[in-house]
Amino acid sequence: MPSTRNGGRGEDRKGIAPEEAGNGVSQLSLMELPTAVLHEIFFKLPVNSIMKAKFVCTGLYKMLSDPEFAVNYTKNSPFTTILLCPEPFTRFGQIPVYRLMEISENYECFRTPSKLQIPGGVDAQSRLSLQATCDGLICFILRNPTADITHICNPFTGDSLVLPQHKTKHGERFSLVYGLGFCQSANKYKVLGVTYNRAQPAGSGQGEILTIGIDDRWRSLAILEVPVPSSLFNMTSVNGVLHWFLLAGHRNTCLYNFDLGEERLGQTPNPPGVVLDLRTMRLISLSSQLCLVDTAESNMIVLWKMKEHKSGQSWTKDIILCKSFPADVRFNGLMPLTVTRNGDIIFSYSWHDFVVSYNPEEKTCNKIEVFESERIAYTPSLLSVKELIRGRHWSNMNVLSN
Amino acid sequence: MARKNRNPVGKNVDPEAQKKKTRTLTLKSSDGQEFSISESAAVLSIAIENMVEDDCAGGVIPLPLVDGGTLARVITYLNKHAEDGASDEEKRKFDEEFVSGMEMGVLFDVVLAANYLDIRGLLREVRRRIADRMKNKSVEWVRKTFHIESDFTPEEEEQMKKEFAWAWEGVDSDVDD
């Protein structure tokens, strides 16, 4: 990391006027603008530009690496962001390159490649399996015939943390799935890991929990019902609660949740009158609400949103009708990903090289080119893993003095 | 986007507002140029409003941190936003055109003046324009346009180019738009 020298010339000057230049234009350096003005300018820029600006001089490097700036940047950013993965299963011996896609209010797109650093690299017998994301962090397993190693990393700052080994058994018959979420009460991120027998994926497994940055070993939980392994993301994290589908037998799927604060398993009531069907349904987090997406009908998408978790009464139903979509956008295969600041819904479109931004009020669509087949809702962070795992509120505490 | 003026001219029939429209103030720039402006336009600047309220104005308001060229531009902005019957849409279009032709040096002068005079709408507009110009530009472009010299060591620079090669590739032309 570059040392900080006297790059920030006059960083803290407050509104000092340009040199007397008559009616001519002064040749001010960007660094001479007041810090508050500079921050506001950078809040309007995508992570892509922020990262480039860091390489301009040590003054900008220092300002843009400051944790307080990073926290406020995330709060103020007008961009809608998606993580793009080249393919659902990464190849043996390769570190995949994810891409951050940032979409502006007028649909300009910025793409930034990830910089995953894996200590020791990835050997030809290992491959990486993405498990979960939360606040810029991603959790992945480096699968190897001898041992699975779990990492938490920020793919855009590049730093990572290796989680402790599990106490539970390993080996070819056993698999792990993870959920990652932020626990408000503890102000920490927690990981739920479930080890299960691969021969009985719908059975039960052994649950273990880890508070990142606090626990140095996994804590055992009672027997847990194991989520149905799916191609991508087994558990959906919403406000500190993990949610997943459980296939408990033929035509008997139910919803489970795990509260990371209370560290307790629960069953979520189905939306009224709904029989869960894994072939047409997905669980996603939409505007910080759990959302069950039902695409069974060919002429509509049903969004069941849950205001408060665990309460069956709080499901509300939204319907997006096929006919409200422009005729040139085929309706089948659309799956909501995320919601923009102005309320547009971004849909992923399986088997097509684009995502669709849909404005529900004006019923208009914009296509945005995307070549990667896997698209995940994701909020980037300029904070390193080390800074992130201190919690979300630490910036209010007196840690900025360094 | 709807803009909130502190003094929504046109809707206001209170006599104090009427007086503000007819009363003029004189603003004096750092290089001694004087500009007349209606009070209703001048007080869109919170800093000027405070000076007027504190009655420290005495007819002429000296603005020692703003040069004449910049002050003239700021006054154009204030007059438009205080104009009777100018719709939000009209003002939005004006704002866009107002900043679109400005060179970077001018944008810097105006952003400093807007910050000092506390003109929120203008400040927001200029900040956005500066940010827009930086999108998709190379590291070199930012250095050149913003008059910044790199103070990284050649080794650090080499290392960054290696680790973040993408930041030096696929950027818009360095020729300014």
Image (cartoon, rainbow, N blue to C red):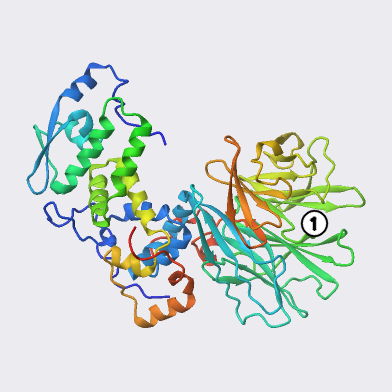
- Location of residue A400 (image quadrant): bottom left
Q: Is residue B7 left or right of residue A332?
A: left
Label 1 amino acid? Pro
**Chain identity of mark 1:** A
Residue at 83% in and 62% down? A205
Residue B121 picture location, percent across and down: 32, 40
Residue at 82% in and 39% down? A274
Residue A282 picture location, percent across and down: 75, 50
Asked if B52 appears above or below B65 in the picture, the reply is: above
- Looking at the rendered structure, the secondary structure element under dot 1 is loop
Nearest the camera: A256 or A122? Answer: A122
Residue at 66% in and 46% down? A329
Q: Is residue B93 left or right of residue A296?
A: left
Asked if A263 appears above or below A297 in the picture, the reply is: below
Asked if B88 appears above or below A341 in the picture, the reply is: above
Let me know if residue A321 appears in the view: no
Nearest the camera: A19 or B70? Answer: B70
Looking at this view, name the residue that lies furthest to the right.
Answer: A250
Residue at 64% in and 63% down? A372
Nearest the camera: A318 or A188? Answer: A318
Q: Quadrant of the C terminus of chain A?
A: bottom left
Please rate how many residues cluster around mark 1, counting C-alpha atoms within 10 Å: few if below 14, some from 14 to 19, many from 20: many
- Location of residue A128 (image quadrant): bottom right
Let me know if residue B23 appears in the view: yes
Q: Quadrant of the N terminus of chain A?
A: bottom left
The residue indicated by pointer 1 is A227
